[in-house]
Amino acid sequence: MHIEPGIVEGSKIVLSYVTAAGAGAYALHLALKSTKESGLGALLMRTVLTTALVFTFFQVFPHYPVGISEVHLILGSTLFLIFGAAPAAFGLAFGLLLQGLFFAPFDLPQYGMNVTTLLVPLFALQFVARKTIASETTYVELKYRQALALSTTYQAGIVSWVAFWALYGEGFSAATVTDVLSFGAAYVTVIIIEPLADLAVLAAAKGLHRLSSSPVVERRLFHPA
């Protein structure tokens, strides 16, 4: 999902600063809400964990270039279900920043675009979760179709933002449209795999009842809303 250097340049890149600022402001809103519910310590612990995981997803997990960008197994819905929206958002932003600082400095000018591409779909996922998961259902009780809905929302959001940045920067040329379609098709694999990963992690968490009162995980994991 990384936007390659040179795709959006000049004055056009200003838009990425605006979208990233908006995503960051909403992430801060979620952080304040999370702090009121679970405390600052819980938010910090979860953020450290999600940052480490996101860094691993980007730097260690297999990733390969397809079309206009790269395909990554980011597991955004897994982070959301286990740690909550605010820690997931901060972990995605900080993990991406660490990768850029230490391993891919050429990606830093595109940071605003890339962080927007990661965070806005997460917020859409949060909205879908509120609408599709009954308040009495804990996350460890989710079914495959529910996990699939969350994963599809997140990954489709990533593909949509990558497509937007590519077309915004390069225009509707045949080559760009073809690259975008290739990238979107490749992400179908991720949409299939991620719900299975979600259910595997949730099944493992279900057996760890001692975590039910731990501040390290999202309260909704074990308790109804």
Image (tube, grey):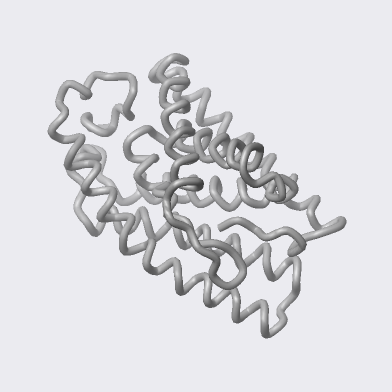
- Taking 47 as reference, is 186 above or below it? below
Q: Residue furthest right?
A: 11
Residue 9 on image: x %, y %? 81, 59
Residue 146 x %, y %:
27, 54
Instruction: From the viewer's side, name the closer residue of 4 and 154.
Output: 4
- Say left or right for 65 vs 104: left
Residue drawn at (22%, 37%) of the image: 138
Quarter of the rendering occupied by the N terminus: bottom right
For the image shown, how many numbered marks are present on the structure?
0
Camera-side residue of 168 and 102: 102
Place of residue 124 in the rendered image (x, y in percent of width and height, measured from the top left): 47, 50
218 lies above or below 36: below
In the image, what residue occupies the spot 22% across and 23% down?
211
- Quarter of the image containing the C terminus? top left
Q: In this view, does 209 lie to the left or right of 88?
A: left
Question: Residue 151 in the image: x percent, y percent?
Answer: 37, 55
Q: Nearer the viewer, residue 31 or 167?
A: 167
Q: Splitting the image into 4 quarters, where does residue 194 fall?
A: bottom left
Q: Which residue is drawn at 45% across and 18% down?
A: 36
The structure residue drawn at horizontal position 30% and vertical position 58%, both measured from the top left corner, is: 148
